[in-house]
Image (tube, rainbow, N blue to C red):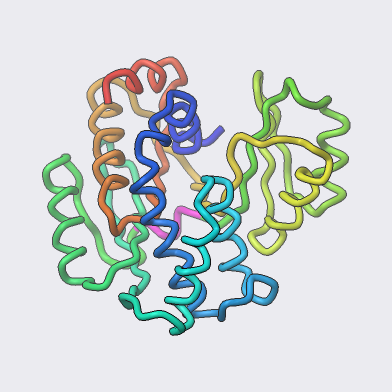
């Protein structure tokens, strides 16, 4: 499993995601609003909105919240205008980072993100400085206890997945972004529950970390993800599972 996905999965299992449900809802509402503004309010014809609504449903967001966010995006209700931006840079140990935000004030957010980088031993770079390291993919993580390998491969490949990786405890299913919803729907139809299902970015190379560098990097990612404007953080770190488990107790 990729380092960042592994870290997110560990935090989710420990309940950290639930503890931050209010912040998660805020981020999801922004994504739904922007998706509706840019592509219209119909999830059938707007893939970005369809994915955002799916994430909101997975997080048990009330239907009323979703509908209001869509109407704010389409202009049926008044609302703040948000814009998408990405900041890039390098963290402790030379790890590459991409920080995606939705903000109503780019200058303010840029200054605040730069401040988080600086306080946590990281440096922001220019546009394109690390983006070349990452590729966009659909990603679905499934516990191996649910289903046999042959059946899993059959459902994944038949529905359009690009690749499946098998580890001791999980299956990792990778898709082209445009096929993500179709593959996810195929698992849902078969009653196969997933632990993580998201559109994300995967690095073409990783940086191995341990010790203080690992702790500083994860603290940086946590600080970035706690910022209200930050939607997603991508990083190309590789930290051993046992170290991630240990640090999850501290951060």
Does the magenta stretch mainly form a helix, a strand or a loop? helix
Residue 182 in percent (x, y) is at 75, 57
Query: In front here: 241 or 53?
Result: 53
Residue 132: in magenta span:
yes
Residue 51: in magenta span:
no
Residue 233 in percent (x, y) is at 38, 49
Residue 16 in percent (x, y) is at 38, 31
Above or below, 56 against 120 in this view is: below
Above or below, 191 against 162 in this view is: above
Above or below, 196 against 158 in this view is: above
With 101 as the anchor, is 73 left or right in this view? right
Residue at 76% over, 36% down: 192
Residue at 66% over, 26% down: 170
With 119 as the anchor, is 240 left or right in this view? right
Locate the N terminus by quadrant: top right
Residue at 82% over, 46% down: 189
Numbered range of the magenta stretch:
130-134
Q: Residue furthest bottom?
A: 75
Q: Residue furthest front?
A: 64
With 41 as the anchor, is 144 left or right in this view? right
Residue 162 in percent (x, y) is at 74, 50
Query: In front here: 30 or 72?
Result: 72
């Amino acid at each position: 499993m990729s380092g960042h996905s592994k870290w997110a999965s560990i935090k989710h299992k420990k309940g950290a995601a639930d503890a931050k449900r209010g912040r998660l809802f805020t981020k999801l509402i922004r994504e739904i609003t922007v998706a509706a503004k840019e592509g219209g309010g119909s999830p059938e014809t707007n893939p970005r909105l369809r994915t955002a609504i799916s994430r909101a449903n997975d997080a048990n967001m009330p239907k009323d919240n979703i509908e209001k966010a869509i109407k704010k995006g389409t202009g049926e209700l008044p609302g703040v205008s948000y814009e998408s931006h990405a900041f890039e840079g390098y963290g402790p140990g030379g790890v590459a980072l991409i920080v995606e935000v939705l903000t109503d004030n780019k200058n303010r957010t840029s200054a605040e993100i730069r401040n988080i980088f600086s306080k946590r031993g990281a440096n922001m770079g220019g546009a394109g400085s690390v983006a070349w390291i990452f590729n966009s993919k659909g990603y679905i993580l499934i516990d191996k206890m649910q289903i046999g390998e042959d059946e899993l491969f059959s459902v994944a490949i038949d529905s359009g997945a690009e690749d499946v990786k098998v580890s001791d405890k999980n299956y990792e299913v990778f898709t082209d972004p445009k096929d993500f919803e179709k593959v996810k729907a195929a698992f849902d139809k078969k009653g196969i529950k997933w632990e993580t299902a998201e559109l994300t970015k995967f690095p073409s190379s990783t940086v191995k970390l341990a010790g203080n560098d690992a702790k500083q990097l994860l603290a940086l990612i946590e600080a970035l993800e706690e910022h209200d404007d930050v939607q997603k953080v991508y990083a190309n770190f590789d930290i051993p599972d046992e170290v991630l488990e240990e640090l999850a107790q501290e951060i």
